[in-house]
């Protein structure tokens, strides 16, 4: 195969809309992970050992709670063939309800086991961080709708903003 033809074929493949969408989605995840890594390293440098340990515990708890509260609703929004306004509304209500109950569960967990967790008197901060699950669920819902509509540039900026504010 001639180099010009190879270059033209590669260029045509990269300008294909679907390939562009995949590359944008990949770069979105890559940038998000790099930002999270850098911000975590910054937090490790700024916070004391005890504070960073508490922050890492609460961050992990919130991420796990978000995973539970999301419960596959974003996958449903993306994969559903015919998505009516009624189905969108039902998924949003389900997402908010699950996020609310998961946040309540986290608060009860900290209230019950907070003294055993050695939070160094930071129970109020831990409880407030647990409530972050509720707005994170709205972001997850919005990300799913953007993914469904194949608006990957908007999704990139939303992912970047959400990863920055999560820390």
Image (tube, grey):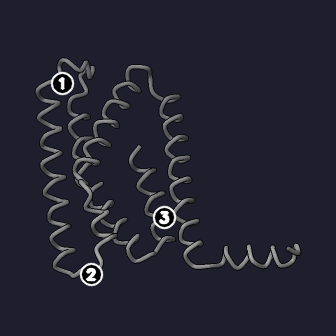
In percent of width and height, residue 80 lies at 28, 73
Kindly identify which numbered label has been placed on residue 101. Answer: none
Direction from residue 47 to residue 137 in the image, left or right: left
Compare marks 1 and 3 and give the one earlier in the sequence.
1
Residue with the mark numbered 3: 157
Q: Secondary structure at mark 3?
A: helix
Quadrant where the N terminus sits is bottom right
Kindly identify which numbered label has been placed on residue 114. Answer: 1
Compare marks 1 and 2 and give the one earlier in the sequence.
2
In percent of width and height, residue 81 lies at 30, 78
Q: Are marks 2 and 3 in contact (CB under 8 Å)?
A: no
Relative to 138, say whether 77 is above or below.
below
Q: Secondary structure at mark 2?
A: loop
Q: Are marks 1 and 3 in contact (CB under 8 Å)?
A: no
Disc 1 to disc 2, C-alpha distance = 45 Å
Residue 63: quarter of image: top left
Residue at 31 percent across and 63 percent down: it is 75
Residue with the mark numbered 2: 82
Residue at 19 percent across and 17 percent down: it is 116
Q: Secondary structure at mark 1?
A: loop
Relative to 150, say whether 47 is above or below.
above
Disc 1 to disc 3, C-alpha distance = 36 Å
């Amino acid at each position: 195969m001639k180099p010009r033809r190879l270059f033209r074929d590669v260029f045509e493949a990269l300008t294909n809309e679907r390939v562009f969408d995949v590359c944008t989605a990949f770069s979105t995840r890559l940038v998000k992970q790099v930002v999270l890594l850098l911000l975590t390293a910054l937090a490790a440098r700024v916070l004391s050992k005890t504070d960073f340990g508490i922050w890492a515990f609460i961050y992990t708890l919130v991420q796990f709670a978000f995973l539970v509260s999301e419960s596959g609703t974003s996958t449903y929004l993306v994969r559903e063939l015919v998505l009516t306004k009624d189905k969108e509304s039902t998924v949003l209500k389900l997402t908010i309800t699950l996020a609310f109950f998961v946040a309540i569960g986290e608060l009860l967990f900290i209230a019950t086991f907070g003294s055993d967790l050695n939070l160094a008197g930071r129970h109020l901060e831990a409880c407030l961080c647990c409530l972050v699950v509720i707005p994170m669920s709205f972001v997850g819902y919005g990300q799913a709708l953007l993914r469904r509509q194949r608006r990957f540039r908007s999704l990139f900026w939303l992912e970047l903003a959400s990863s920055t504010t999560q820390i």
